[in-house]
Amino acid sequence: MVKKAHVSTTINGEAVEFLCEPRQSLLEVLRDTLELTGSKEGCNNGNCGACTVMLDGVPVNSCLVLAVEAEGAQIGTIEGMADTAHLHPLQQCFLEGAALQCGICTPGFLVAAKALLDRNPRPSEQDIRFELAGNLCRCTGYDKIVRAVQDAAVALQETSR
């Protein structure tokens, strides 16, 4: 019998405690234990970025992080991106620009793009492509995604004035 570990963390600004097996990934716990199913399991080996979450301010592939590593950490998931009444400008621009189709990759792209815009509110196209290089899309293509991030950057700049 595997002894479960107790983990105390903060997810999307709320204190959360859970039990997990030492070998469980953060993605497994988010989806299966905490029912935060926005982060998707794509490749489950860190190559596609579908499971990207923020861990202490850094985008990570949650399939490669052990849940026990979340002890005391600040985690941000796609569920924490929008407020209750409005989509985040990135989400709105993805919708308006048709930068999503099947939806498996979209949460990871959004979390990674938000991390970029939080750090660099005026990214170049090259900055966006470089930052999102760890996220794969098999449906839409990258041009629409890059344009949506550019549109969101402009929208965020206009709202901050």
Image (tube, helix red, strand yellow):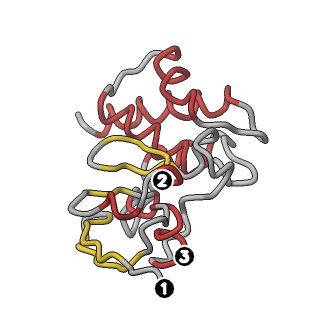
Label 2: state its secondary structure.
helix
Q: Which residue is drawn at 33% across and 57% down?
A: 69
In the image, is residue 44 above or below residue 27? above
Q: Mark 2 or 3 closer to N-term?
A: 3
Residue type of the residue flagged with mark 1: Met
Question: What residue sits 32% from the left and 31% below the top?
Answer: 157
Mark 2 belongs to which amino acid?
Ser
Report whether 52 appears left or right of 122: right
From the image, state whether disc 1 or disc 2 is nearer to you.
Answer: 1
Q: Residue furthest front?
A: 1
Residue of label 3:
32
Q: Viewer-nearest of labels 3 and 1?
A: 1
Q: In this view, does 102 lie above or below 131?
A: below
Q: Gap in Å between the C-alphas at discs 3 and 1?
A: 20 Å
Cα separation, mark 1 vs mark 2, equals 25 Å
How dense is the environment of label 2, judged by Cα within 10 Å: few (below 14), some, or many (20 and up)? many
Q: Mark 1 points at which residue?
A: 1
Instruction: Please provide percent x and percent y for residue 142.
Output: 68, 29
- The crowding category of the residue bearing disc 3, from other C-alpha atoms within 10 Å (few below 14, some 14 to 19, many at least 20), is few
Q: Which mark is residue 141?
A: none
Say if mark 2 contacts mark 3, CB within 8 Å: no
Where residue 53 sits in the image (x, y, percent)?
Answer: 43, 51
Q: Earlier in the sequence, mark 1 or mark 2?
A: 1
* Residue at which label 2 appears: 62
Tag 3 secondary structure: helix
